[in-house]
Image: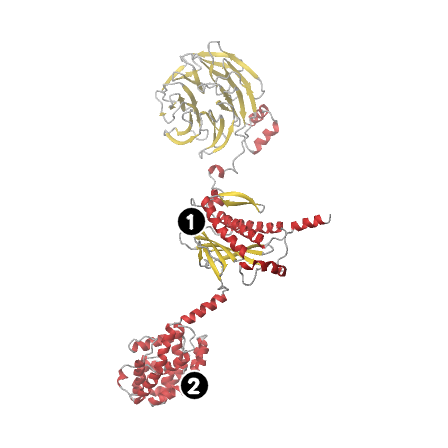
Amino acid sequence: MATQVSTPVKSHTGLFSTRTAGGRMPLTPSPRTRTAAMVNNNNNNNNSSPFTPERKTLDNERVATKSVYGGNLSSHFQKSTSRTSHRDSPKSNIAKGVQTPRRALELGVSDFALTGTGGKTPSSKSSRKGPIRQKSTKTTVSYGDRFIPNRAASSAIATVGCGKLELGDKSRPNSSTGESSAVLSSAADDALAALGSLSLNDDDEPSTYSRPSPNTVAYQDSLASACGVSLNQRILAFKPAPPESSKPVDLRSQYNRPIKNANAASAQFRRRVATAPERVLDAPGLVDDYYLNLLDWSSGNQVAIGLERNVYVWSAESGTVSSLLETSPDTYVSSVKWSGDGAYVSVGLGTGEVQIWDVEEGTKLRSMTGHDTRVGVMGWNKHTLSTGARSGLVFNHDVRIAQHKTAELVSHTSEVCGLEWRADGAQLATGGNDNLVSIWDARSLAVPKFTKTNHKAAVKALSWCPWQPNVLATGGGSYDRHIHFWNTTTGARVNSIDTGSQVTSLRWSPHYREIVSTSGFPDNSISIWSYPTLVRNVEIPAHETRVLHSCLSPDGQMLATAAADESLKFWKVFEKKAGSASSAAASGSSAKADMVKQMTIR
Amino acid sequence: MSTAPAGKEKSKTHKLSLKGSSRLVAEFFNYSINTILFQRGVYPAEDFAAVKKYGLTMLVSSDDQVKAYIKKIMSQLDKWMVGGKISKLVVVITSKDTGEPVERWQFDVQIFAKPSKKKSSSKVPDKENSTPANEAAPVEKTEAEIQAEIQSIFRQITASVTFLPQLDGDCTFNVLVYADADSEVPVDWGDSEAKDIVNGEKVQLRSFSTANHKVDTLVSYRVG
């Protein structure tokens, strides 16, 4: 645009173009551009603030225009257009037509017809302020436009604006070049005078702007009433600080169920365990001795129990009881153990003698001596019978040969009360009253592979994990109360449980990832633990006195426990699920009948 | 014979006096404050004791300090209520960390039988005269109905924990009262801002009304 306007020759086109430009950015009286324009002007003129339209600069400008007009018109155009490029294009156009600077002022009035039209387009653009400006008087038009936005921005609607606008009008001449300021014409004097008179207004204005308090107060009032805040009401607060909370509150814990531990979390998936015994048998004369092992269940589904000097065999299938043997009066039965095939039972005696009986025939097959002290624990591995004695010695006997003693396992220094072969016969675990757990490699029995000293009491309970052959569970006595789990390949302890009471026996479930422990004082209970989570699934208060012995049925569902209260109880702790269970249930209520069915299924 | 049932009827629907109604409202405030403190976890749950009230099990603070604090508030509230000076009771739960209100329980009190335009307690006798004129406003309710209304408010307050946002960090509470400008203000009470929740969500809960009062419940809480 500037280039177009630059030459007077092109005035027509220039005029035209500027007109059209009137709709464009430069002319739009939108506050933004206005201010921008003003800033430009002010920058030109001594950087005075936009709010105080100093007369001086105005004068200068005024003068400048005039002088320019008086001087080289074309050069002025160039300058003015180039410098103040946008703002006064219409003016300049008109000015172009009218030569005398003097008339420029008057023309200013007449201009308005023109600028007014130009101003309309902006007004539509500039929203609410537009109408006001248009109303404010025609005289003010273009310059007024420029001023208002600032005021509006600085304070409220300020009807004062009208008067101001006029002032603005005058004070706001075609700002132009500083160079021309030097030339003063008579017109400048007029302008000065006019400005002087206006200046009074000016003084007023700032004051009204500077203290908008009455306005705002009124605003607040009206706002308050609009918001419905009643002034004849007070909001009172109880001043004293409320007492401190005694401890931080977490609502989450208050409303949500406590985050379930693994135990609770599995509650809905946890299987139901019958907590009532399936069957109770009397076991009169059962010796209340932790170190003995007087109960065993054969693979042939027969339960052998040593009651003082007698060994009885209870057939789970028929429910019949037979007395297998009675020892000489000078001794007693200290341990019983079925051979793997369920055909023979070995009986350890208080004298240290070990007898092997054929249950079917009811006859003693042989008697093996060697121990000087009572044999409290025995274990079969095929044809090898291991016997642990009070002396702490463990002997291996090959029951087939005359010179039966095949190995002497020396490790324990006190009575051996726990002894368990691994199912594959590769390892043997023994536990003793010396609080030791010894793990033996069947191929080299000279020294134990590992000797574990973690227990703080006698170790009677030993059990090999059926699904993870290198895991051994061991349970300690009253002072220890712990179950430890061992990796028998590395010798590492992999887990521990503090059971809270003497552990008298441990049995892994062959079907579930669970292990059952029996307790002595103070609980006298049966506990079922999940492995490896070590969560106690259920605790059954099983007996009135400590549970001394336990053994699992050959199908792995039933646990038999013998306690010092001279009773033998059968618990269906590892009942199989669904199909097999229903068939078992259909078979009848007696443990015996169950057994038959399950055994046949098996 | 006929008088007996009438008497019974009367006793059943007996209209609470303004004083009784004020007591009832004040008592409602007391339980409201306690319930809010419990439900919103301002104080730990073990500091509260269960009490049977409104046919519900209400939890009331058993902490001596908190009890004393609420008692002080309530004693003044009682006076104001009887004087008909109060238009709002507000329980503001404030975050201890930021000091900003996070939750605002507002109980609007409307008094049907305003003693007089002058609102001065000395005009109590006048009120007796004026009440008959005003009796159009409240529908007479049995005590059981009022109880049921209050009960449902407490049920709502209790249930509101399901939609109210989790209060983070330690919180404390303040009690505000919108009182008439001419009410007597004890030293413990002072002018305060409204402690509104900026850009808060508002949920209007149920109301209850007696012959003389209507109480609206509104909870506003900060979102996000």
Q: Nearer the viewer, residue A102 or A166?
A: A166
A387 and A280: which is toward the camera: A280
Q: CA distance from mark 2 to mark 1?
A: 70 Å
The residue where tag 2 is placed is A113
Q: How many marks?
A: 2
Callout 2: chain: A
Q: Secondary structure at mark 2?
A: helix
| Residue B170 numbered tag | 1
What residue lies at 66% left-to-right and 51% top-to-bottom?
A: B10
Which amino acid is tagged 1?
Asp
Q: Is residue A377 visible?
A: yes
Q: Is residue B224 visible?
A: no
How far across and how far down the image is residue A191, in percent? 33, 86
Q: Chain of mark 1?
A: B
A70 is higher (above) or lower (below) than A434: below
Residue closer to the observer: A368 or A515: A515
| Local secondary structure at mark 1 | loop
- Check whether the beta carbons of the residues at disc 2 and disc 1 lie within 8 A of each other: no
